[in-house]
Amino acid sequence: MPAPARVLVADVPEMDEKIRDCLPGHDLTFVRTMYDAIRKLRHDGFQLIVIGLDFDESRMLELLQYVRSLAGYRDVPVVCVHAEQMNLSEAVLKNIDVAVKALGGLGFLNLADGAINYKQDCSLLDQVAIESGQRLRPN
């Protein structure tokens, strides 16, 4: 069995259960504010960063940019997610995915209940965590 990955999850509390379901057995640390995320990133070596669309009043892309500015996290995968029932069109979801990738993230996954690719996206997130857990931890 692969070692669990140390994962920083920056999202609203309502998404905790969904993230836990997608990342079973991994070492999850939840943060709710930009300040807490920055503090944790400075002291703990995470192997995967998951950022929710609604994190700290929609600061998802700001946190992604911050993570990419840190030398110790340049090669750590960052996945952005959306997990609430919102009526976002496929075009909007695609544009967010393009923005996330442009800023150095792996992509934007739709984990909302009833999403067409929910199981596939949830499995992909777990696979990224498993692969990340096999790498050395950042300093």
Image (cartoon, helix red, strand yellow):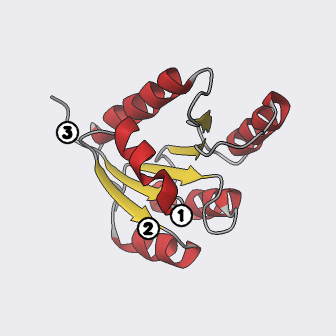
Decide: few, some or many residues near mark 1? Use Cα within 10 Å; few <14, some 14-19, many ≥20.
Answer: few
Residue at image position (65%, 42%) is 85
User: The C terminus is located in which quarter?
Assistant: bottom left
User: The N terminus is located in which quarter?
Assistant: top left
Residue projecting furthest to the left: 1
Residue at image position (48%, 61%) is 13
Q: Which residue is mark 3?
A: 3
Q: Percent position (x, y) of residue 83?
A: 58, 43
Q: Is residue 116 left or right of residue 136?
A: right
**Secondary structure found at label 1:** loop
Q: Indicate the amino acid at tag 1.
A: Leu
Q: Percent position (x, y) of residue 122?
A: 46, 30
27, above or below 113, in the image: below
Alpha carbon of mark 1 to alpha carbon of mark 2: how far? 9 Å
Q: Which residue is mark 1?
A: 70
Q: Which mark is residue 93?
A: none
Marks 1 & 2, CB-CB < 8 Å contact:
yes
**Secondary structure found at label 2:** helix
Marks 1 & 3, CB-CB < 8 Å contact:
no
Q: Which residue is mark 2?
A: 41
Q: Indicate the amino acid at tag 3.
A: Ala
123, above or below 8, in the image: above
Alpha carbon of mark 1 to alpha carbon of mark 3: how far? 25 Å
Question: Which of the marked residues, 3 or 2, is nearer the chain's N terminus?
Answer: 3
Residue at image position (62%, 62%) is 63
Residue at image position (54%, 61%) is 12
Within the image, what quadrant is residue 87 found in?
A: top right
Q: Percent position (x, y) of residue 55?
A: 60, 62
Q: Indicate the amino acid at tag 2.
A: Leu
The answer to whether any part of residue 10 appears in the image is no
